[in-house]
Image: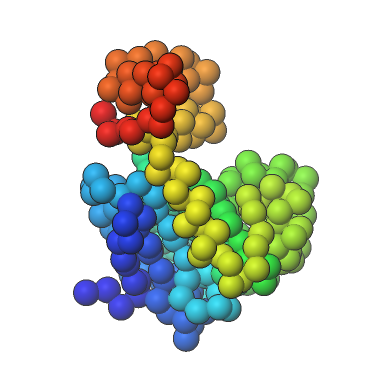
Amino acid sequence: MSTNLLTESKGSNFWISINRADKMNALNIDTLREIKLAVAEANASAAIKVIFLTGVGQKAFAAGADIAELASFSVEEGTKMSADGHSVMNSIEQSPKPVIALVNGFALGGGCELAMACHMRIASNNARFGQPEINLGLIPGFAGTQRLCQLIGKGKAMELLLSGNAIKADEALSLGLVNQVVPLEELYATAEKFAEILSSKSPVALARVIESVNAHYSFEQDGFQKEIKEFGASFGTDDFKEGTQAFLHKRSAHFKGS
């Protein structure tokens, strides 16, 4: 049983909480591996519609990588850790079910990268974001140099990456790094309310939206052609039939995910 994570199914929501509050929920190798397994577990359950990722306590979502673990790494060990970290982040980004980061405090270094890998981010008003690896003579290793540019643009991303400065939740919102900022005591209720909206949608369509958006940032795919393919394929689903019939008969749709 994992001691690094707490996982719980609540209705159609699956909660993954990093359980290392004494270390500000720092991400060691075992924790990263367990996050990937937990996301896979949620995706394997037809009952789960939305995945939440957060940290235990009120101080940190994840305050970065575990420096004590990586301080003595060799080049080979550092390279492997980065590759493994990319694999974890990619598994989140490519999840067919929406993954929402609930950022309840510090999201620094690997923690910021973990939040950025999620499809959306809801932050508490005490949240802080940054990539301070430069202060250790490092660069981000879990795709921080890539996703930060995607989310907030090259110029501002370069500023944060080169300076190592952290930004507050309100600035993160203005830059587009987070989708919403709420008081800490309202964070979970806000997330659950939004999950109700997502849970009412077609799981098949949600997955296709995620795939198509991700294709835009892939060097291996043409996002425009991906959209055409997924749009056309949607016409062959039971969810499309249900959605259109519900609209025409002025009733709520009841999607089954097929």
Question: Where in the figure is residue 220, as x and y percent of width and height?
Answer: 45, 27
| Residue toward you, 248 or 42 | 248
Q: Is residue 99 above or below residue 72?
A: above
Counting the numbered discs, the total is 0
User: Going 46% across and 76% down the picture, which residue do you hit?
Assistant: 56
Question: Where in the figure is residue 256, as x and y percent of width and height?
Answer: 27, 34
| Residue toward you, 113 or 78 | 113
Q: Quadrant of residue 80?
A: bottom left
Quadrant the N terminus occupies? bottom left
| Residue toward you, 192 or 177 | 192
Left-right relation of 258 to 250: left
Q: Quadrant of residue 63?
A: bottom right
Q: Residue furthest front?
A: 250
Left-right relation of 96 to 258: right
Question: Where in the figure is residue 157, as x and y percent of width and height?
Answer: 71, 50
Q: Quadrant of residue 198?
A: top left
Q: Is residue 159 above or below residue 138?
A: above
**Residue 137 appears anywhere in the view:** no
User: Going 42% across and 71% down the picture, which residue do you hit?
Assistant: 18
User: Going 37% across and 18% down the picture, which residue do you hit?
Assistant: 245
**Residue 239 appears anywhere in the view:** yes
Q: Is residue 124 above or below residue 221?
A: below
